[in-house]
Amino acid sequence: MSERVIAITGGHGALGRAVVEAALADGLKVAVIDHAAGQIASEGVLELAGVDLTDPDSATRAINAVVAHFGQLDALLNIAGGFVWQTVDDAEPAWDRMFALNLKTALHASRAALPHLKRSDEGRIVNVGANGALKSAAGMGAYAASKSGVHRLTESLAEELKSTSVTVNAVLPSILDTEQNRKDMPDADPATWVRPADLARVMLFLASPASRAITGALIPVVGRV
């Protein structure tokens, strides 16, 4: 595994940083692709900031830069995304924005990565769906619909790639124990939530050669919620 190269979109976010840390601990070579700027002071990390993954050409340039730097790509972890809570009658609907941030980023990055992943002996795509997209709740329509799209993308792409070395799976977390979520839900019990480090471990297993028998799976990672 020490020779494997993984690209992580949204790598400067709370979950992304946890995945980067765990990947480096496993000896993986890591590329961080993000729209936001950040700095991960660690050898073996390629950081690409200012990347608009909602634009297919921008996604392709970023993935090609990863391959140009490392010479290969073995796994893509699609973490980039966003969240909004709003009712359907909101004056400024966020449906287009949610589909752009959650579904199109995963789609464009995956399309750009596919030619390179197919050359890997054990190519992997790991998407981040949402347990809350299995049955939506009030105010969750736009977010849940976009994440449901991620689920369908995962399933269809997995079927399309069954004749190759590439597997495609998604994790479906409940509530992540992040600083922002603690601020947004001060009365909740974060002990029941999912730690980013724990979700990172599941994602890295799915990105590893050991997961070769799993494809098209939507794996709930819900803690004690």
Image (spheres, rainbow, N blue to C red):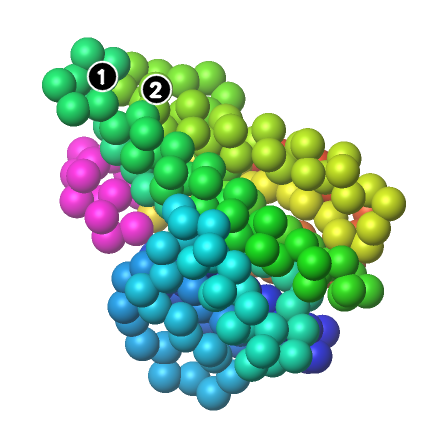
The answer to the question of whether label 1 and label 2 lie on touching residues, with beta carbons closer than 8 A, is yes
Check disc 1 and report the residue beneath it.
87
Q: Looking at the image, can residue 31 be seen?
A: yes
Tell me: 63 left or right of 213: left
**Magenta-highlighted stretch: main secondary structure?**
helix
Name the kind of residue labelled 2 in the image: Gly
In the rendered structure, which segment of residues is drawn in magenta? Answer: 178-192
Looking at the image, the residue that sits furthest to the front is 57
Vertical placement of residue 53 versus 89, above or below = below
The quadrant of the rendering that contains the N terminus is bottom right
**Residue located at (16% from left, 24% from top):** 92
Q: Which residue is mark 2?
A: 141
Could you say whether the residue bearing mark 2 is in a helix, strand or loop? helix
Provide residue 37's location: percent of width, then percent of height.
27, 68
Residue that appears at 26% across and 19% down: 139
Quadrant assignment, res 38: bottom left
Provide residue 136's location: percent of width, then percent of height. Answer: 40, 18
Q: Picture coordinates of residue 6 (x, y %)? A: 59, 67
Mark 1 / mark 2, whichever is N-terminal:
1
In the rendered structure, the answer to whether residue 183 lies left or right of residue 129 reads left
Residue 54 to residue 205: above or below: above
> Which class describes the residues within 10 Å of circle 1: few (<14), some (14-19), or many (20+)?
some
